[in-house]
Image (spheres, rainbow, N blue to C red):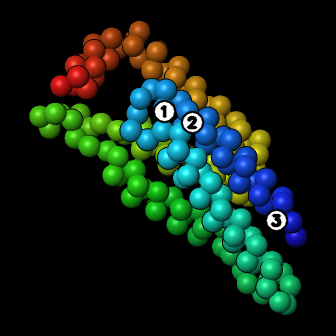
């Protein structure tokens, strides 16, 4: 059984990794930034940590209350989808949707929080690194490889 201090450490790991994603979104001047991503990641982690605590903390020992990890993951993933839906909006004149990447980054922050809650630090650290590369480097690559698409995206955002 983990101590509450160990479980608190998982919350801090979730805050650190999701904070990195949130900082990237913040510096890109997106609608959901550092605070939103950290809140989502820490809350997702807290659902897992509470599930672990509850399943092992009742009289009768381990197994008296059982959590289903897949159900927990699914519940958080679906719930965060509703939050992400609030970020996505249709661009001017019914053109391209906007906010999809930020909504997806919030969904990813929830997954990082879940992973941290389960103690999968290397996995969530690697996922965070991959997401940061995708959010920063892929955009620069798109600018070079697909300049006309990037230009039309800028024009849509300026209106």
User: Residue furthest toward the front?
Assistant: 35
* 31 vs 45, nearest the viewer: 31
**Residue plotted at (40% across, 50% down):** 84
- Image quarter where the C terminus lies is top left
Which residue lies under the disc numbered 3? 4
Comes first in the chain, label 3 or label 1: 3
How far from the left and from the top, in percent, is residue 38?
58, 47
C-alpha gap between disc 3 and disc 1: 31 Å
C-alpha gap between disc 3 and disc 2: 26 Å
How far from the left and from the top, in percent, is residue 95?
18, 33
143 w.r.t. 28: above or below: above
Mark 3 is surrounded, within 10 Å at the Cα level, by few (under 14), some (14 to 19) or many (20 or more) other residues, namely few
**Residue plotted at (82% across, 65% down):** 4
* 70 vs 45, nearest the viewer: 45
- Image quarter where the N terminus lies is bottom right
**Residue plotted at (26% across, 43% down):** 89
Residue 111 visible in image: no
* SS under mark 1: helix
Comes first in the chain, label 3 or label 2: 3
Mark 2 is surrounded, within 10 Å at the Cα level, by few (under 14), some (14 to 19) or many (20 or more) other residues, namely many
**Residue plotted at (14% across, 38% down):** 94
Which residue lies under the disc numbered 1? 25
Residue 37 visible in image: yes
Which residue lies under the disc numbered 2? 21
């Amino acid at each position: 059984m983990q101590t509450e201090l160990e479980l608190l450490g998982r919350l801090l790991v979730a805050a650190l990794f999701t904070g990195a994603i949130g900082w990237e979104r913040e510096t890109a001047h997106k609608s959901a930034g550092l605070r939103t991503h950290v809140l989502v990641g820490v809350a997702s982690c807290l659902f897992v940590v509470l599930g672990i605590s509850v399943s092992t903390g009742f009289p009768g020992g381990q197994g008296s209350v059982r959590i289903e990890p897949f159900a927990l993951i699914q519940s958080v993933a679906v719930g965060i989808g509703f939050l992400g839906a609030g970020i996505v909006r249709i661009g001017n004149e019914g053109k391209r949707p906007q906010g999809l990447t930020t909504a997806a980054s919030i969904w990813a922050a929830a997954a990082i929080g879940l992973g941290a809650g389960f103690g999968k630090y290397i996995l969530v650290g690697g996922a965070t690194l991959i997401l940061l590369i995708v959010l920063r480097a892929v955009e620069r690559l798109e600018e070079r490889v697909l300049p006309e698409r990037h230009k039309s995206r800028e024009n849509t955002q300026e209106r």
